[in-house]
Amino acid sequence: MKHYLKYMKGNWKYAILAPILIMVDTAGMVVQPYFLQKIIDIGIANNDTAYIVKTGIIMIVCAIISLIGGFLAMYFSSKAAYGFAANLRQELLNKIQEFSFSNINKFSTSSLVTRLTNDVEIIQQLVQMMLRMLIRAPFMLISGIILTIAMSPKIAMIFLAITPILGITMGLLIKKAFPLFTKVQQKIDKVNSVIRENVVGARVIKSFVREEFEEERFGKANQDLRDTTIRSFNLMILLMPLVMLIMNASVAAVLWIGGNGSIEVGQISACITYISMTLMSLIMLSMVFMNFSRAKASSDRVIEVLVEEPDVKEEEKGITQEIKKGLVEYNIKSFNFKDSDGDAILNNIKFTVKPGETVAIIGTTGTGKSTLLNLMLRFYDVTEGYVKIDGIDVRDYNLKTLRQSIGMVPQENRLFAGTIEENIRWGKPNASIEEIKHACKIAQIEDYIESLPNKYESRVEERGANFSGGQKQRLTIARALIKKPKILILDDSVSALDSTTEANLRKALNEEFNETTIFMVTQRINTCKTADKILVMDDGTIVGEGTHNELIKENKTYQEISESQKEVMPEE
């Protein structure tokens, strides 16, 4: 629990008040059988109406105090638990935001979602339960035993017999349940993963008529989760019949002891109630420990994220100097992903790009083109060598400064739910509407937006589902352009544009961003022709560098790519 104390910040007063009020509530409950015993053995036995009324009023007052205490305890414990969970979720999200791509790949997206939601909720439920039951149960148990001893030492001996039996039973059940609870959380990960793939890939699934296959795949994951959950909760279900058996045996023992007339009727009634209370308190404790066992599995998964060290670490005194030129130098001996046992992704990469130059990077799929540019933004860190901007190693920059100075249009055209204007403002939160319109004009999307009824206030559905591939690409380009970056990266981000639109975009970029260093990952030879420099990549290394005319004469890989596109992509 020491890992979690700091997440109670802002909620300590509720966490302290809840147990105090629980004791008030429990005290009001515990004294009820005592007063009832007095009414039976004194008031009714002596036909003393005044005593019955007086004691009855005391019982009513105690019940009201107990009710108020119980209500407030529930309120404060809920506030403390939900406040704790909110702080923990926020910290988890903040931690995930610090992760590099390697860290995220280690956990997987679906698992991180489960840890942020389901696992945190299970820990929250335990905190709420501990604030109530972990105080109520021992207090009720101890009070019940003391009052029973005060009334009848013979009956109190029953407690000494049943407590170790229940303790051993609870221990065995918890020991057996713990590994099952860990498996349950892993099965939830799997179900979330399948759901995510089905929702995100709905169009692909329908186009390939794979609905039945995906239904079967989800059914299997869902059934695995169901079966594992049932096995884990079957152990908890066993607890209640065992406790009821012990309780009924205890009641029988009390009646047998009291049957010889040595104990008064009121005492028997009170002792039976106290036995029930004591056993209920033991059930509460068992539920706390059982839930603790389940929460331990979730806690381990949450702590895994909290203690994970980001691969990309920011220097405490990182350079906050703005990138002014856009001079880029690569000198990489080798690069590989963290914990990868395979061959290096990149090898012997060495080139320099002058400020204002446009560089096209071309090569077959999987040659490391996107990875090469991800190193500039420090989504990964170079393992051997360096990447420099304006003569400064990117690892020496303040991360925020570095990434704000670079405009990035990734392969996946990610838009967020909201409006078009809100999505463009991701690039520059304080941008004026004129700046937004100008960025959209350069990105060749202005005319389409102006044709919409709500124009820039038009809604964008989750992941931009209500826009075509080309429209999403142009919106993400506008989002990057509004930053007016000194370095612009277009990672295969014009692939969905027709030749005319792409040509207009390149012309607008040349006119408006002629001092910006531009990197374009592309599969099109026609795109390369307008670049100042072309880098040809193959198998993680640069196998050619030069202009189109130079490479078409001298570079075999470039010639092969050009030859393959002659029929499918005629020259403009």
Image (tube, rainbow, N blue to C red):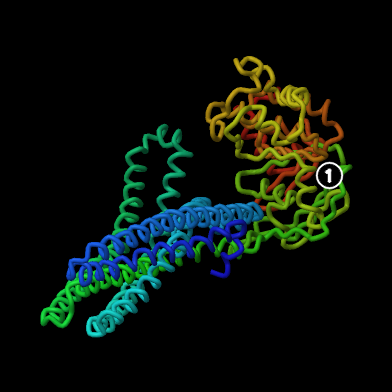
Q: Position of residue 424 (x, y in %)?
A: 69, 31
Instruction: Give the secondary structure at mark 1.
Output: strand
Looking at the rendering, which quadrant does residue 410 occupy? top right
Can you give x and y, in whole percent of width and height, for residue 50 in the image? 26, 62
Instruction: Specify the quadrant of the image occupied by residue 522.
Output: top right
The answer to whether 560 is drawn above or below residue 117 in the figure is above
At x 80%, y 48%, the residue is 401
**Is residue 217 at all visible to an observer of this figure?**
yes
> Quick check: 30 left or right of 402?
left
- Residue 544 image offset from top left, x and y in percent: 75, 46
Q: Nearer the viewer, residue 48 or 365?
A: 48
Quarter of the image where one finds residue 100: bottom right
Q: According to the image, label 1 marks what residue?
A: 353
Q: Is residue 128 left or right of residue 368?
A: left
Label 1 crowd bin: few (<14), some (14–19), many (20+), radius 10 Å = some
Q: Amino acid at mark 1?
A: Val
Is residue 139 rendered to the left or right of residue 158? Answer: right
Relative image position of residue 174 (x, y in whole percent):
35, 72
| The C terminus sits in image quarter | top right
